[in-house]
Image: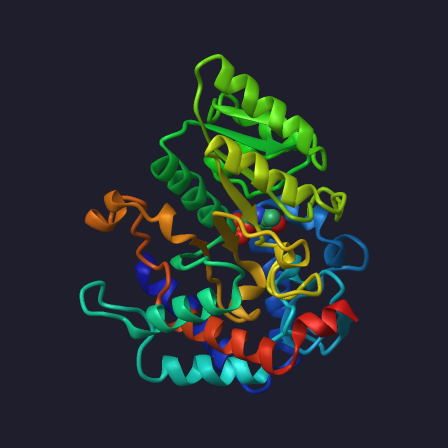
């Protein structure tokens, strides 16, 4: 009986999704039910926080295109938030959507046993557009998950245990990623977290050197220094010129992996395809995400230099991770179309301008 009711409820929702036009009566139903269900089944907190609800009654988003989010009643909003940095190619970019639809028409996810070709094509393209000898890719579903993989890879590749991160940093909210986070408000409820992390001031390479030097002096080992080439969530903080290059030479000196988290500042957003190119520095591991899926599909990942991909990982490809959905065909198709679109339309150049 209960399941029958659920099925009927969902039939109605699916009819909304499929409808070309929604009647005014249904628009009202959708608006009221969205507020009610957010309140009861999601979290009342969002109703207070979202300005679209708290400042002028509820606006439910339904369509989007280009730089515009549209409400159910056709209200248009210029999207200045960009979905936290995912819409570098705009909302529902037609070329990306067309490719994704074509992929959906023949295969959505993958068998996990046969070889899924788009993973290989995308990995090659990512290697082609990233600086230096960055080569081996591992695809994930969200930014924090990519950061987890970067942290784990650094431990495997270097044998080191500690991480150096920066005050103000944001790397996501999973347990490992938030351990690297540099904002107390996000961390306090979850302590103790990954213990072997030292936070140093962002933009001061000398502080990173001292932290590593002192850890080594007392017999500890350091796996990685993780840093955003431009701190995003901290307030878009550009470090002094030469900072990244200095970190590079410190990490080389101590055999520490240098991880650049380009999830927010990468994919053209700061005027070069990846921010580290502007400083002429190649990390050992780089994360990417957000705009990587073209604002259409969620896909993130890491790329690393060949020496990071150790024999241990070659012999046991399950070791780093095996996310069920990571690098699935439909998400890869979006990223492939995104990279092509960004190159053909010089998106980095547009961002620089
Ligand atoms: C630099 C950086 N790293 C990681 C993340 C986490 O990404 P996600 O929210 O997809 O987990 C973010 C998100 O804002 C970010 O800006």
Residue 147 coordinates in the image, percent (x, y) = 48, 45
Residue 224 coordinates in the image, percent (x, y) = 49, 35
- Image quarter where the N terminus lies is bottom left
Residue drawn at x 64%, y 68% as measured from the top left:
87
Is any part of residue 121 visible from this angle? yes
Looking at this view, is 64 or 90 the one in front? 90
Work out which residue is located at the far top of the displayed protein and give it. 218
Residue drawn at x 76%, y 71% as measured from the top left:
77
Residue 160 coordinates in the image, percent (x, y) = 40, 29
Q: How is the image coloured?
A: rainbow
Residue drawn at x 38%, y 46% as measured from the top left:
308
Residue 223 coordinates in the image, percent (x, y) = 44, 32
- Quadrant of the image occupied by residue 31: bottom right
Q: How many marks?
A: 0
Is any part of residue 33 visible from this angle? no
- Horizontal arrangement in the rendering, residue 243 relative to residue 335 (left or right): right
Looking at this view, is 78 or 157 the one in front? 157
Residue drawn at x 49%, y 21% as measured from the top left:
192
* Above or below: residue 23 compared with residue 267: below
* Above or below: residue 222 compared with residue 318: above
* Above or below: residue 5 compared with residue 27: above
């Amino acid at each position: 009986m209960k399941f029958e009711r659920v099925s009927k409820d969902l039939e109605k929702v699916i009819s909304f999704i499929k409808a070309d036009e929604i009647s005014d009566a249904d628009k009202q139903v959708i608006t009221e039910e969205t507020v009610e269900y957010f309140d009861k089944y999601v979290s009342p907190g969002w109703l207070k926080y979202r300005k679209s609800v708290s400042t002028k009654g509820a606006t439910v988003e339904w369509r989007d295109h280009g730089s515009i989010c549209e409400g159910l009643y056709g209200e248009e909003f210029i999207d200045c938030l960009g979905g936290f940095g995912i819409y570098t190619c705009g909302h529902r970019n037609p070329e990306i959507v067309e490719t994704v639809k074509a992929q959906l028409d023949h295969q959505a996810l993958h068998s996990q046993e046969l070889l899924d070709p788009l993973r290989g094509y995308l990995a090659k393209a990512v290697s082609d557009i990233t600086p230096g000898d960055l080569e081996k890719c591992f695809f994930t579903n969200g930014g924090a998950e990519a950061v987890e993989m970067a942290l784990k890879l650094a431990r495997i590749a270097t044998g080191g245990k500690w991480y150096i991160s920066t005050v103000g940093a944001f790397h996501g909210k999973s347990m490992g990623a938030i351990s690297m986070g540099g904002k107390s408000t996000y961390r306090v409820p979850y302590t103790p977290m990954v213990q072997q992390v030292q936070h140093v001031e962002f933009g001061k390479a000398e502080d990173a050197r001292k932290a590593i030097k002192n850890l080594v002096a007392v017999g500890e080992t350091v796996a990685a220094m993780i840093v955003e080439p431009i701190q995003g969530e901290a307030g878009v903080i550009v470090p002094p010129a030469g900072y990244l290059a200095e970190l590079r030479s410190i990490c080389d000196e101590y055999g520490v992996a240098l991880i650049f988290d380009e999830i927010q500042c990468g994919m053209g957003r700061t005027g070069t395809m990846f921010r580290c190119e502007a400083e002429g520095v190649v990390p050992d591991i780089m994360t990417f995400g957000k705009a990587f899926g073209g604002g259409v599909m969620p896909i993130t990942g890491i790329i690393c230099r060949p020496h990071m991909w150790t024999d241990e990982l070659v012999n046991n490809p399950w070791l780093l991770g095996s996310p069920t959905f990571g690098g699935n065909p439909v998400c890869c198709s979006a990223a492939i179309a995104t990279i092509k679109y960004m190159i053909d339309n010089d998106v980095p150049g547009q961002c620089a301008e």
